[in-house]
Image (cartoon, grey):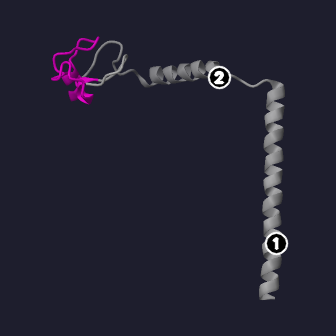
Amino acid sequence: MTETTGSTATPESGNPEGADGAAETTPGGESRRDRKRGEKKSGKRAKKGVFARLALFYRQIIAELRKVVWPSRNELVNYTTVVVVFVVVVMAFVAGLDYGFSKLSLWIFG
């Protein structure tokens, strides 16, 4: 029995406490067995209309975008410069390889 502090192990994943899992109830009052069977839920978790789900989706998007750490203008210019310079260097390398292979193939095949 190796269980760490704050473990989220459930009876289904091998937690020996309450091994049957049927007697435990969730905050909604239904047992885990009922939830596994797919019986309808009521209350907060009941199926919402398409517009309510869409509104929730967009609210969650906005909430996540507020958590983003946006770069400052100077950081953005620096990042853009680094990317453009790197792309130019890689393009020059590939162009050099292409030129070299074309000259080599002309020399071999005439």
On screen, residue 61 versus residue 19, left or right, reads right
Q: In the image, what residue occupies the spot 19% across and 24% down?
A: 33
Which quadrant holds residue 39? top left
Residue at (31% x, 22% y) in the render: 3
Residue at the extreme bottom of the image, as rendered: 110
Q: Which mark is residue 100?
A: 1
Question: Which SS class for mark 1?
Answer: helix
Q: Nearer the viewer, residue 39 or 86?
A: 86
- The residue range painted magenta reads 10-39
Residue 42's label in the rendered image is none
Numbered disc in front, either 2 or 1: 1
The rendered magenta stretch, by its main secondary structure, is classed as: loop
**Is residue 7 or residue 12 the one in the foreground?**
7
Q: Which residue of the protein is positioned furthest toward the front in this rendering? A: 2
Instruction: Name the spot of residue 61 as percent of width and height, x first.
Output: 57, 24
The residue under label 2 is 68
The residue that appears at 27% across and 29% down in the rendered structure is 13
Q: In the image, is residue 12 above or below residue 46? A: below
Mark 2 residue element: loop
Q: Is residue 38 at all visible to an observer of this figure?
A: no
Specify few, some or many for label 2: CA neighbours under 10 Å numbering under 14, 14-19, or 20 or more: few
73 in the magenta segment: no
Could you tell me residue 54's position as x and y percent? 49, 24
Residue at 62% x, 19% y: name it.
Answer: 67
Residue type pointed to by label 2: Val
